[in-house]
């Protein structure tokens, strides 16, 4: 009972701590273990503002705020894509899903799409995963979960606001709209700042790890993004890193969990109206 409670709390809080030395690998095909943990991970990861709004009984879709729509639909999209791509890349590989039954592969693929969303659990050895799987996992870890929740990363809303801004720019629209609502330029700037600062932290951390270790770029990048997004996944090299590399990972964890939230809050609090406008000039882009 104590073990179940521990793993339930760890899952809801996206901590990823397990009482087993090989995490959840022994339960890779057990739906009664994997699926409840996945549900707890998703519930904690969507963010408390979303949970509160859903508990208030808002009408499905039409009564939802833009934040809830972005979080719910973004979560579903990333889960479907993550699960599908994980299954595609690992389905027949002897090192991972190949030896499992069809049902076991499906359960493992669902876990592969959920756990990188900063949950930290793993039901396969990522050191044996294909490079394509590591790339998709990197993307899922960097995006993370919902704002004001237990997940890390730059957050789904940040990613989707930038995606909609690019889409509206491609279509030649000056105003960014989501669900018949306009998104202010200040929100777009905040999202861009959080994303670019996150990329800068990951790039710098990866560079420092490459300098201080002899591991490949794939392995080091995976460790850096996992640390920044406070995920805790590893390709198996964490225990062998020198002290200097461990300090880099700890710094990335701190920046990833506290830094992006602080930056977003600071940008929102320091926003103030400007009583004048400077002459505009258009530099060449692209």
Image: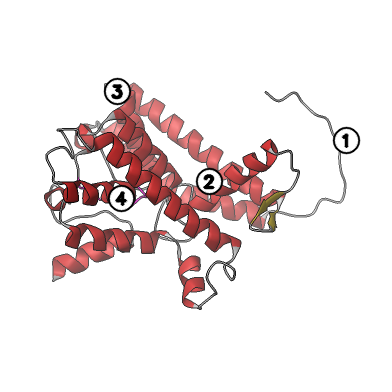
Residue 141 is situated, as x and y percent measured from the top left of the image, at 38, 44
Q: Distance between the residues labelled 3 and 1?
A: 48 Å
Q: How crowded is mark 4: few (under 14 residues within 10 Å), some or many (20 or more)?
A: many
Residue 188 is situated, as x and y percent measured from the top left of the image, at 65, 47
Say whether residue 235 is visible: no
Callout 3 secondary element: loop
Say whether residue 45 is visible: yes
Image quadrant in which you'd find residue 127: top left
For label 4, the residue is 115
Query: Which residue is located at x 44 percent, y 46 percent?
Result: 256
Residue mark closest to the camera, 2 vs 1? 2
Q: What label does residue 216 carry, if any?
A: 3
- What segment carries the magenta color? 114-123
Q: What label does residue 66 carry, if any?
A: none
| First in sequence: mark 4 vs mark 3 | 4
Q: Residues within 10 Å of mark 2 (few under 14, many from 20)?
A: many
Residue that lies at the very extreme toward the front in this rendered image: 102
């Amino acid at each position: 009972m104590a073990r179940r409670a521990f793993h339930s709390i760890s899952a809801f809080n996206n901590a990823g701590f397990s009482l087993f030395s090989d995490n959840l690998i022994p339960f890779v095909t057990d739906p009664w273990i994997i699926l409840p943990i996945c549900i707890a991970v998703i519930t904690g990861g969507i963010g408390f503002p979303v949970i509160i709004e859903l508990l208030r009984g808002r009408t499905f879709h039409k009564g939802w705020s833009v934040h809830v729509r972005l979080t719910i639909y973004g979560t579903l999209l990333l889960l479907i894509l993550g699960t599908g791509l994980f299954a595609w890349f690992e389905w027949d590989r002897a090192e991972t899903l190949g030896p499992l039954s069809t049902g076991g592969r499906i359960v493992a693929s669902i876990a592969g799409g959920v756990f990188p969303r900063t949950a930290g659990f793993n039901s396969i050895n990522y050191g044996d995963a294909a490079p394509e799987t590591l790339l998709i996992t990197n993307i899922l870890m960097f995006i993370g979960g919902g704002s004001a929740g237990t997940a890390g990363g730059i957050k789904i809303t940040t990613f989707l606001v930038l995606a909609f801004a690019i889409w509206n720019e491609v279509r030649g629209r000056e105003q960014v709209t989501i669900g018949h609502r306009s998104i202010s330029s200040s929100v777009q700037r905040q999202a861009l700042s959080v994303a670019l600062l996150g990329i800068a932290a990951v790039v710098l951390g990866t560079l420092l790890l490459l300098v201080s270790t002899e591991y490949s770029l794939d392995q080091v990048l995976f460790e850096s993004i996992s640390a920044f997004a406070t995920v805790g996944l590893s390709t198996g090299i964490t225990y062998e890193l020198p002290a200097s590399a461990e300090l880099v990972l700890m710094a990335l964890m701190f920046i990833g969990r506290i830094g992006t939230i602080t930056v977003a809050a600071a940008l929102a609090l320091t926003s103030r109206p400007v009583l004048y406008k400077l002459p505009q000039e258009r530099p060449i882009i692209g």
